[in-house]
Amino acid sequence: MIILANLSKTFLKDGNKIEVLRGLDLEIKKGESLAILGVSGSGKSTLIHILGTLDHPTSGNISINGMSVFDWDEKKMARFRNSNIGFVFQFNNLLPEFNALENTMMPALISGMPKKLAAQKAYKLLEEVGLDNRVRHKPGELSGGEQQRVAIARALIMEPELLLADEPTGNLDTETGKKIEDILVNLNATKKITLIVVTHNKLLSERMSRKIGLRDGKIYDYK
């Protein structure tokens, strides 16, 4: 499904080149669950942003379902991202002025989906993550775990084939984090969504079908 070929990312800081990713080669199969591990600054978040087409590689290529996505213009790439990729970040980025239902609907409304249909899909997803009694609550009225469940529902509303999660349990206590883990693992198992997780959480990484590490901008087998 996803093929990285000689992928590199370099940043310029104070006139110096910083090589964050160095010639990565990786294949990720459809329906796989993959954990990406490494110390802070190893390039994990940079990699997941590139996988999600939120950032561009300096060189190399990514193919998703046989399509070289970085050959497209930004408009086409944005449409593809909205329809095919779901994102869950450590900071859930919910819009504070909108309630849980409205936040969940947002990607669907952006895509042009009729409001009634978007609301129906959003409610069903919130019900699936156990928030059917909290749909009218705004983020400030929800716990951290509830906010993250809204973020997961929002990530799923366009029925993406790829779900990217960057430290999804990083701001949560152990018990709440376990509930988020369960939701993500269940989504991968039941909906066959390809799941890629950046995490420091060893328990979560152990529940993925495969683990890789990043060190000095290179991929290594994580054991």
Image (tube, rainbow, N blue to C red):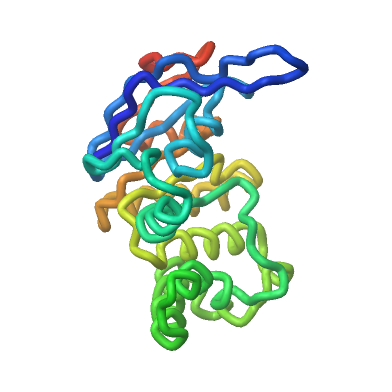
Residue 13, visible in the rendered structure = yes
Q: How many marks?
A: 0
Instruction: Kindly give the residue lying farthest to the bottom in the view shown.
Output: 116
Name the quadrant containing residue 80. bottom left
Q: Quadrant of the N terminus?
A: top left
Residue 89: where, in percent of width, then height? 57, 48
Which residue shows up at 60% across the image and 58% down it?
A: 145
Residue 173 higher or lower than 132, as above or below: above
Which residue shows up at 52% across the image and 51% down it?
A: 88
Front-most of residues 169 and 60: 60
Which residue shows up at 40% across the image and 54% down it?
A: 76
Residue 29: where, in percent of width, then height? 23, 36
Residue 6: where, in percent of width, then height? 36, 19
Residue 183, visible in the rendered structure = no
Front-most of residues 43 and 71: 71
Which residue shows up at 34% across the image and 53% down it?
A: 186
Q: Quadrant of the C terminus?
A: top left
Residue 120 higher or lower than 200, as above or below: below
Name the quadrant containing residue 82. bottom left
Residue 154 higher or lower than 18, as above or below: below
Residue 15: where, in percent of width, then height? 73, 15
